[in-house]
Image: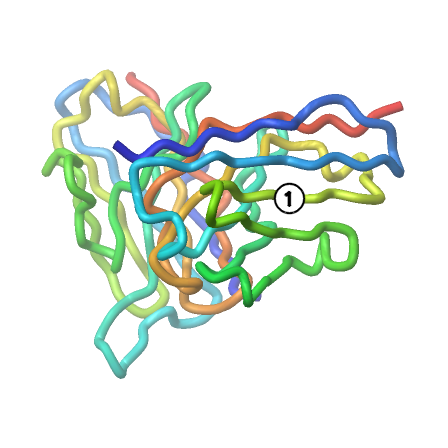
């Protein structure tokens, strides 16, 4: 199985500042035949189901604010929230969909400082 | 608007059975792979099972293989998960989610249904 790790476990950021979350996969999730990274990011607000934010590592889902961005390739990925808003308080998960079983990271909790 | 609504969760004793349902609307149900993903209290997400749009292909995590059965009724736009021989470690909120392909991100998630396995 591909193991996903995330860092940090949690972080507190002031409103309007930048939050950066890292995700690492135990093997590459880059598929060279289509030049895509099989990596998604989800946001789970308290008491809610997960919500898709980004897929193919950097493509924003429709309706997701542009303060959310994703980068990285192969085994190392980053989710950046530029200008943190109060509604961004949540747990963020990365997920690989390169190989079965599809696996998720342990999550990173983002709070307001 | 895409809607996924799970039902059927509850309290069950170890060794017992439960059937979860997920009613879907707002998209062409038969065109999508459907999956069950669970989340134990305070934990991360774990893929449990998936089924192709036609229902011909079914897939399971090793942790539930032989105990859980996924199925779908495309005429009713409904996904099911039959859970047998339940264990304490199956306690979790179970979400249904859709995706365009088996190896793909999950576009939409339901609100989840809580399954508690305890004596």
Tell me the residue at 31%/76% (across/down): A31
Image quadrant containing the N terminus of chain A? bottom right
Secondary element under disc 1, as helix, strand or loop, is strand
Report which quarter residue A38 is drawn in: bottom left
Given the current orientation, which residue lies at the most extreme left position? A66
Q: Residues within 10 Å of mark 1 (few under 14, many from 20)?
A: many
Q: Nearer the viewer, residue A49 or A4?
A: A49
From the top left corner, tell me how far across and down residue A59 is, in percent. Answer: 18, 53
Q: Is residue A112 left or right of residue B39?
A: left
Tell me the residue at 25%/70% (across/down): A36
- Counting labels gives 1
Report which quarter residue B100 is drawn in: bottom left
Q: Chain of mark 1?
A: B
Asked if one can make out residue B4 in the rendered structure from this viewpoint, the answer is yes
Given the current orientation, which residue lies at the most extreme bottom position? A33
Q: Is residue B48 above or below residue B5?
A: below
Report which quarter residue B43 is drawn in: top right
From the top left corner, tell me how far across and down residue B86 is, in percent. Answer: 81, 40
Tell me the residue at 58%/35% (across/down): B21
From the top left corner, tell me how far across and down residue A93 is, in percent. Answer: 40, 42
The residue indicated by pointer 1 is B81
Q: Is residue B67 left or right of residue A109?
A: right
Asked if one can make out residue A10 in the rendered structure from this viewpoint, the answer is no
């Amino acid at each position: 199985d591909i193991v996903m790790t995330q860092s940090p476990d949690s972080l507190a950021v002031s409103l309007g500042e930048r939050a950066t979350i890292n995700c690492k996969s135990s093997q590459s999730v880059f598929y060279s035949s289509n030049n895509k990274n099989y990596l998604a990011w989800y946001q789970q607000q308290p008491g809610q189901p997960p919500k898709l934010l980004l897929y193919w590592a950097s493509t924003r889902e429709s309706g997701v604010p542009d303060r959310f961005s994703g980068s990285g390739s192969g085994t190392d990925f980053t989710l950046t929230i530029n200008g943190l808003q109060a509604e961004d308080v949540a747990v963020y998960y990365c997920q690989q969909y390169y190989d079965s079983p599809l696996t998720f990271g342990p999550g990173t909790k983002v709070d307001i400082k | 608007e895409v809607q996924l609504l799970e039902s059927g969760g509850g309290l069950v004793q170890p060794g017992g059975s439960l059937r979860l349902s997920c009613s879907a609307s707002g998209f062409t149900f038969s065109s999508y792979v459907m999956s069950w993903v669970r989340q134990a209290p305070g934990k991360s997400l774990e893929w449990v099972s998936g089924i192709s749009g036609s229902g011909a292909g079914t897939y399971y995590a090793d942790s539930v293989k032989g105990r859980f059965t996924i199925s779908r009724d495309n005429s009713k736009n409904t996904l099911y998960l039959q859970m047998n021989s339940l264990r304490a470690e199956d306690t979790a909120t179970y979400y249904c989610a859709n995706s365009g392909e088996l190896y793909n991100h999950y576009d939409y998630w339901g609100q989840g249904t809580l399954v508690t396995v305890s004596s």
